[in-house]
Amino acid sequence: MAWRSSGTSNAELVENLWRNKLITQPLAKSAFLQVDRAHYAPSSAYEDAPQPIGHGATISAPHMHANAVETLLPFLLPKVEEGPQSAPGVSSVCGLTGRPRRVLDIGSGSGYFTHVLAELVGETGVVVGLEHIPALKRLGEANMAKSAEGRHLLESGRVRFRVGDGRKGWAEPRPADAQPGVGGPANGSGEEAGGWDAIHVGAAAVELHEELVRQLRSPGRMFIPVDAGDGWEQYIWTVDKDERGNVRRERLYGVRYVPLTDAPKS
């Protein structure tokens, strides 16, 4: 169905993904409608296909981003109610009530998916886009600044682009008086609590890096493509950590991603 989902505008692309059941959750659809892919893809922005963005990186096909969002959605939406909480298309929102969402997007590339995530985490949420290539970090910032909403997210600190080794996760202290520190060990509570509710990895890892698992909150979820070890096959895995800290790993389906590697040596 993916090849039938391309459009001539952002709205048409999203509607086609919806019609073909590649987007199935209303809140995910709304988030994709709010982020114009033309601000992030250098060409053929409304095709349901990956596009190269330079430095050996790509912006993934929209249907892959849709699946990643829907897989992570229970851990992205703000948890505002005590006890069970549902949302349109989401039977259970997972997390500690009132704890601001913290989301790490490893291999943020163009910045497109980072922006979509930011549309879902609420006013107190923070999304960090992490890149190992400084030029791609700058690209993400520049792309997001093309829209008024993107500029607001950057200026408020609700979206931050950083340079680092995504295999080690990310931690940073409070960057400004009005902005919280984020990441690091998954402990504490409130605005300054460590760890990540959701981790998205946009490149294929050689293993399920344990440091990323350690930085998952309880509860939390990671979406990560992992190389099968034969040099060709890759699979999407989810790693879930429950309220007691128990970890469950599940292999979902085969994919093809660029590798999660060291930055090129200059």
Image: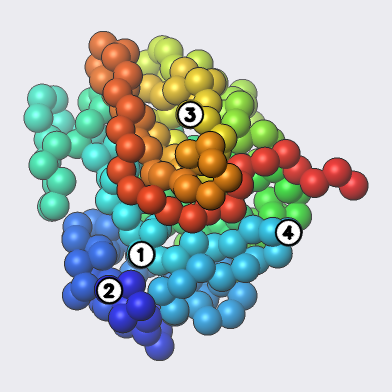
Q: Amino acid at mark 1?
A: His
Seen at 50% across and 20% down, the residue is 210
Q: Mark 3: give few (<14), some (14-19) or many (20+) Cα within 10 Å.
A: some
SS assignment at label 3: loop
Distance between the alpha carbons at the discs numbered 3 and 2: 30 Å
The answer to whether mark 3 and mark 4 are in CB contact below 8 A is no
180 w.r.t. 105: above or below? above
Residue named by callout 3: 208
The answer to whether mark 1 and mark 2 are in CB contact below 8 A is yes
Q: Which mark, by number, is residue 1?
A: 2
Seen at 65% across and 45% down, the residue is 131
Of all residues, the one furthest to the bottom in this rendering is 8
The answer to whether mark 1 and mark 3 are in CB contact below 8 A is no
Circle nearer the N terminus (1, 4): 4
Question: Residue 178 at what x, y percent from top left?
Answer: 54, 33
Q: Amino acid at mark 3?
A: Leu
Q: Mark 1: give few (<14), some (14-19) or many (20+) Cα within 10 Å.
A: many
The answer to whether mark 1 and mark 4 are in CB contact below 8 A is no
Evaluate whether residue 53 shows in this view. Answer: yes
Question: Residue 256 at what x, y percent from top left?
Answer: 49, 55
Quadrant (top left/top right/bottom left/bottom right) for the N terminus: bottom left
Seen at 75% across and 55% down, the residue is 135
Distance between the alpha carbons at the discs numbered 1 and 3: 23 Å
**Nearest the camera: 152 or 10?**
10
Q: Mark 4: give few (<14), some (14-19) or many (20+) Cα within 10 Å.
A: few
Q: Nearer the viewer, mark 1 or mark 2?
A: 2
Evaluate whether residue 123 shows in this view. Answer: no
SS assignment at label 1: helix
Residue named by callout 1: 63
Residue named by callout 4: 55
Could you tell whether 245 is left or right of 161 in the image? left
